[in-house]
Image: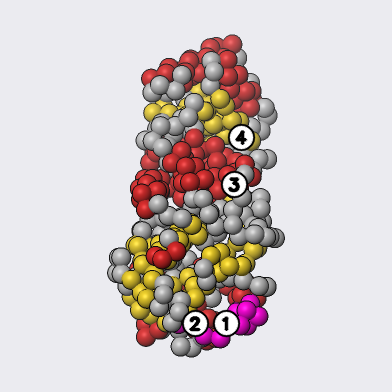
Amino acid sequence: MKFQEIKNNVFYCGLNDRDRKMFDELIPLENGTSYNSYLVKGSEKTAIIDTMYPPFTEEYLKNFDENGIAKVDYIIENHGEQDHSGSIPALLEKFPEAIVVTNAKVAENIQSMLHVSPEKIKVISNNEELSLGDKTLQFIIAPGVHWPDTMFTLIKEDNMLCTCDFLGAHYTFDNVIATPSKELEHSAKRYYAEIMMPFRMMCKKYTQMIKDMNIEYVLPSHGPVYKDPSFILDLYTDWTADTPKNLVVLPYVSMYESTKSMIDYIADKLNAQGIETFKFDIIDDDLGDLAMSLVDAATIVLGTSMVLAGPHPAAVNIAYLASVLRPKAKFAALVGSYGWGGKLFDLIAQLLAPLKLDIVAEPLQVKGKPKTEDFAKLDEIANAIVEKHKSIGLI
Ligand code: FEO
């Protein structure tokens, strides 16, 4: 495969993985993903910025031969996770004169995880520069998006910033330069929801930093290159905003339609009050859609059936997932139905506790199908949500 020149001797040498169906064995991929790697040819030295997911190593290395690259001086590693660092040992075998240039945390990770020899690593500090001749690389240590080891690499003369996983998308392409579209926005948001949302405040900080740098090209480690970075930066500004949107997400698992009927009832009441709702069937729906809705939601209403004497395990999974994704939601309500007895909400509330959600009303646990008095309590829950949304100016 011929490397695509992005600009001025900076080339894309990554690969598309169009068949991959899951990432992190957690969130389904709708458009596969790409593992981005960049080749920077200076007048004196040549560098590769980030490497390759191990199963693609053979194809990745072959492409250097096909593009006539016989010598590489530096392998810049922005992040130690193996979808970007996993091919370092093979690259060092192919280009034995190369050294890995990275920060101390990545150096520690690639030594311990990939057994890269410390003699092959040059450790740099924040803002340090590396000359390739007519091009200069500058390293900006940017921990927290999404590992403690992450950094960005600026190709100074070309005003291009390699942002590692930050600003990425699980997306594949023929032309590496992004064409802004709703489809790309959707993929980037899905990616943000799973990978970056737990670090929203760091994302917010670096989004502003990159805006202030007036970068011309953003080169992430997954998905296309942004020639006009305002597309992705404006999206991140929206997603990382402190104020949620006038949206209630209602994940539920329902064995005999009782819990579902409660969720439907609350959603209808909220819709009638001008609140957008997103009902999510935990068993049948796509987890990525739930994660995306959590980017914006102000309120989570979790519905669960009882299994034995506790919440359905699928609802427990969702409560745990929400707690680790750390959405900006402020309010919650809990509803559910049981057959013979037990406690529906203790474990769920415990799992959601790190989110510090304001539980808007007494959780409602009904036996079998909800009765007239239960619907009155559902009205109270819906009304409480409306009042909470009003209290923060969403309505
Ligand atoms: Fe795409 Fe954190 O690796």
From the Cβ of disc 1, is ligand 1 less than 8 Å away?
A: no
Q: Which residue is mark 1?
A: 69
Residue that mark 4 sits on: 280
Q: Are marks 1 and 2 in contact (CB under 8 Å)?
A: yes
Q: Residues within 10 Å of mark 4 (few under 14, many from 20)?
A: many
Task: Determine the CA span between mark 4 and mark 1.
Answer: 50 Å
Separation (CA) of disc 4 from disc 2:
50 Å
Q: Do the residues under discs 4 and 1 have CB atoms within 8 angstroms?
A: no
Q: Mark 2 = which residue?
A: 72
Residue 261 spot, x, y in % from top left: 64, 23
- Mark 4–mark 3 Cα distance, whole angstroms, equals 28 Å
Highlighted magenta segment, given as a residue range: 61-73
User: Callout 3: 10 Å neighbours few (<14), some, many (20+)?
Assistant: some
Residue 312 image offset from top left, x and y in percent? 57, 38
Residue at 58% over, 44% down: 185
Q: Is residue 67 magenta?
A: yes
Q: Nearer the viewer, mark 4 or mark 2?
A: 2
Spatial separation of the CA atoms under disc 3 and disc 2: 33 Å
Name which residue type carries label 1.
Ile
